[in-house]
Image (spheres, rainbow, N blue to C red):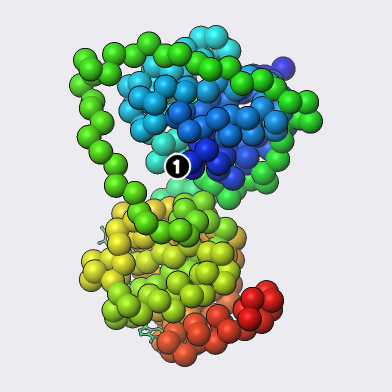
Amino acid sequence: MKKVLILAEHKKGSLKKASLELTGASKGMEVSAIVFGSDAKAAADDLAAKGVQNVFWVKDAKFDHYHPEAYAAAMDQVVSQVKPNIILGNASSLGKDLIAKMAARLDAPLAADCTEATIQPDIKLRRPFFSGKAVGTIEFEPAELVCITVRPNSLAPGEVSSTAGKVNELAVNFDFASSAVQFVGKTEGSSDKPDLTEAAIIVSGGRSMKTKENFKILNELADVLGAAVGASRAAVDEGLASHDMQVGQTGKTVNPKLYIANGISGAIQHLAGMRTSKVIVAINKDAAAPLFQKADYGIVGDLFVIVPLLTKEFKKLLGKA
Ligand SMILES: Cc1cc2nc3c(=O)[nH]c(=O)nc-3n(C[C@H](O)[C@H](O)[C@H](O)COP(=O)(O)OP(=O)(O)OC[C@H]3O[C@@H](n4cnc5c(N)ncnc54)[C@H](O)[C@@H]3O)c2cc1C
């Protein structure tokens, strides 16, 4: 049976849904996982409860923040112990960086940012190319080890098995002081909304929002839907939204079930970041806006009228009125 090593991610101890998509994809296989951080106990326990046979928890607080060399050293230790055939992670900032690094270190092929992924009995992968204009099937040449990253919201979350595994604390020998890479600091956004790259629903605003304060109506709609709030680059460049909200080629790639674009024209660079969304709703007062060609549903009209109406109706529908 093929062995899988999952790079698991958590937020303040809570296992990310995207990691559960990876356990779901590995159902019935021999699965190990690695998780980092002194606050990751609950996430490690959760992985074991989901049937991951061996969870390696790097508990040392020095690993609370991503350090590429130190994390790779930890991965090296687990890889030499477990000898996986597949290293599986999310196409998150961490997964994209660390798994690409591991592929290079271990001289293993990498399929990055897959939007369709089956790993058993055979590996079947598909991923977008050319900013999503084409989707290709990936096949590996025979290899002892392959590396795969999967875009969040691409797979169904699930457990590996109903038999709980065990958590092993992993001590990693890494000389932080001598490393060329030093952790300087981390600034976290203050938003209580879901992470943009993992959100199941995103409400996004463009240049047409005109002021920062006007994003309030998008935040209200997002709160009712449990959504994250995104923005076009024009909105970010004009100071209406923060950089971490930018969706697109030079922003974040998102893959929600529902993307509601408010006053966003649909430039190719914006589409590059959101065109794999399962359902796209465009609200624009210009019936000829290019985004309508990609949208599943379109509303032609003034967003400042339509968004509050939607919020009101969703409140009623969802019993939040
Ligand atoms: C190298 C490069 C990288 C880029 N990367 C990105 C990226 O990552 N993400 C990104 O988004 N863009 C990116 N861009 C910019 C991109 O080309 C567009 O300029 C940008 O996406 C436009 O943003 P927008 O749709 O908000 O603004 P506009 O194109 O100005 O569109 C505004 C839309 O709002 C509509 N509108 C106005 N008022 C209302 C109203 N009251 N109600 C309803 N609709 C209204 C208008 O009809 C119009 O369609 C990049 C560009 C380059 C060159």
Where's residue 257, x and y in %?
59, 60
- Image height check: is 23 above or below 181? below
**Where's residue 85, x and y in %?**
59, 18
- Residue hosting label 1: 92
Q: Quadrant of residue 269?
A: bottom left
Give x and y (percent) for residue 212: 30, 74
Q: Quadrant of residue 138?
A: top right
123 relative to 173 in the view: left or right: right
Amino acid bearing label 1: Ser
- Residue under the image location 48 percent in, 69 percent down: 203
Q: Is residue 254 visible?
A: no
**Quadrant in which the N terminus appears:** top right
Q: Residue at x 31, y 54 (%)?
A: 250
Mark 1 crowdedness (10 Å alpha carbons): few <14, some 14-19, many ≥20: many
**Residue that lies at the very extreme toward the right in this rendered image:** 162
Identify which residue is drawn at 23% across, 17% down.
177
Image quadrant where residue 287 sits: bottom left
Q: Is residue 169 above or below residue 181?
A: above
Q: Is residue 58 left or right of 48 when viewed as pictured?
A: left
**Residue 57 in the image, given as x and y percentages of width and height:** 52, 23
Observer able to see residue 304:
yes
Tally the numbered discs.
Answer: 1
Q: Nearer the viewer, residue 180 or 105?
A: 180
